[in-house]
Amino acid sequence: MKHKLHNLLILLFVILPGRSLMAQSATAQAYTLYPVLWQQTAAEYRALCYQAFNAATHQLSTYSSRSLRKRHAVIVTDLDETILNNSYYNAQLIKDGKSYTGSSWKQWTDRAQATAVPGAVAFLQQAAKRGVHIYYISNRDTSEVAATIANLKALQLPDADVEHCIFRSGPSSKEARRQQVQQQHEIIMLLGDNLSDFTDAFEKKSVAERFTATDAAKANWGAKFIVLPNATYGDWLNALYDNRSGLSPAQKDSILNSSLSGIR
Ligand SMILES: [Mg+2]
């Protein structure tokens, strides 16, 4: 697998001779080719999503209706790559040889055309049927609320309204927003593709620290914490970059390659 990607990168350099800037940009895009294709075409990705929502369904079934009512139970979920599939946006970036920008992302979310992650709609509808409200805590910008609500409604997701869409208006951390929900409710389950969707123990941490925090929360995975797969982007990648922004493609390339552990 590693060799195939390596060959692909070499091929990109060969077919774009003497155009170093373009070749560099092609390298950055090539890194997301496998994960985006995987999300769009691998039945294994699909199966993992169903596995996550089956675990969520099981977890919900452990509560009696009386207990859910008594607790004012709610579910907190992330949106992107947890409930909404945005792989089309990332695929288009690859096709166009472009990188993520806030404005092209906003153009995508304005279209309200994200599809649902497999299993997401049935699970959230079932929770709603049991009287459990859903809070969508997302780092989409607050200017994206209206289009996102249209997208959620088109997918027939419950609680698609302003009260339940708590988007980013300040720091990227979701902790304050979780606490806001917790003031009146008990959060019985959290869903996300990024570990900072669950607790602040994962925020701006190194790879080693993220491993330690993951191990410490071992009993929660597949129970109170439901994780969806996303190999295209996320804090796992930011951790490799030491949570620094503004790195050049060449710096990123060097960091990624030096982060590989080979045979000793
Ligand atoms: Mg997400």
Image: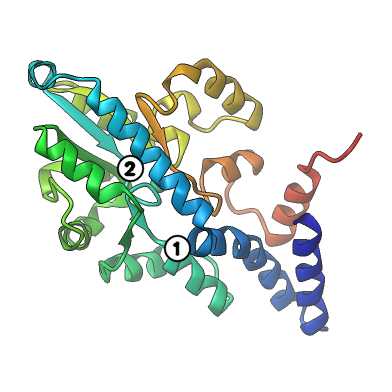
Asked whether the viewer can see residue 250, the reply is: yes
Q: Which mark sits nearer the N-terminus, 1 or 2? A: 2
Residue drawn at x 35%, y 37% is 54
Quadrant in which the C terminus appears:
top right
Q: Position of residue 161 (x, y in %)?
A: 11, 50
Is the CB–ligand 1 distance for label 2 below 8 Å? yes
Q: Amino acid at mark 2?
A: Asp
Type of amino acid at the residue the image marks with label 1: Ser
Image side of residue 236 versus residue 16, left or right: left
Q: Is residue 237 left or right of residue 157?
A: right
Label 1, secondary structure: give it: helix
Local crowd size for mark 1, using a 10 Å CA cut-off: few (<14), some (14–19), many (≥20): many
Label 2, on which residue? 78
Task: Where is residue 99? Give x, y as percent.
Answer: 54, 67
Position in image of residue 94 (x %, y %) = 56, 72
Q: Say which element carries label 2.
A: loop
Which quarter of the figure is the N terminus placed in? bottom right
Q: Is residue 209 above or below residue 92?
A: above
Which residue, given by chain and number where applicable, does mark 1 sit on? 87
Q: Quadrant location of residue 58?
A: top left
Q: Is residue 210 above or below residue 77?
A: above
**Could you give the CA–CA distance between mark 1 and mark 2, rounded to whole angstroms?**
16 Å
- Measuring 17% from the left and 63% from the top, which residue is drawn there? 154
- Category of crowding for the residue at label 2, using alpha-carbon neighbours closer than 10 angstroms: few (below 14), some (14–19), many (at least 20): many
Its colouring scheme is rainbow
